[in-house]
Amino acid sequence: MKAIVTVVGKDQVGIIAGVCNTLAAENINVLDISQTVMQGFFTMMMMVDLSQCQTPFDQLDAALKHFGESRGLSIRVQREDIFDAMHKI
């Protein structure tokens, strides 16, 4: 299963490393990544592969949110199928 991870917050050192380390600890592979800084705010979207992850999705979501809150970031993870359904016209 694939998922979309979004990260938004004030730019700071180590955001990408911290998110990727959190994902790697759960055996999650990053398939694609796009990030930018707009007027001091960091934004990132990632497509990740959850097929090797043994952690239940709700616990993964909580771990990412916890990391984000500790850094003043908003981090959200959505299953790819749900993300696609939400963004269809």
Image (tube, grey):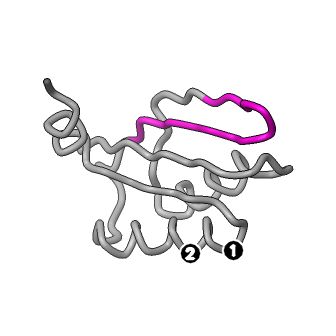
Please state the total of marks drawn on the protein image. Answer: 2
Query: Residue 42 is drawn in which quadrant?
Result: top right
Residue 37 relative to residue 24: left or right: right
Q: Quadrant of the N terminus?
A: top left
Q: Is residue 19 magenta?
A: no
Q: Which residue position is annotated with label 1?
A: 70
Q: What SS does tag 1 mark?
A: helix
Q: Secondary structure at mark 2?
A: helix
Q: Quadrant of residue 54?
A: bottom left
Quadrant of the rendered image containing residue 31 = top left
Relative horizontal placement of residue 13, taking residue 38 as reference (left or right): right
Left or right of 1 in this view: 25: right
Q: Is residue 19 above or below residue 67?
A: above
Which segment is the magenta one? 35-48
Q: What is the residue that sits farthest to the front in this orientation? A: 39
For disc 1, the neighbor class at 10 Å (few under 14, some 14 to 19, many from 20) is: few
Name the magenta segment's main secondary structure. strand
For the point 56% across and 63% down, the residue is 25
Q: Which mark is residue 66?
A: 2
The Cα atoms of the two marked residues, 1 and 2, are separated by 6 Å
Residues marked 1 and 2 touching at CB (< 8 Å)? yes
Relative placement, left or right, of 48 versus 75 is: left
Instruction: Give me the residue at 56% from left, 55% from top.
Output: 24
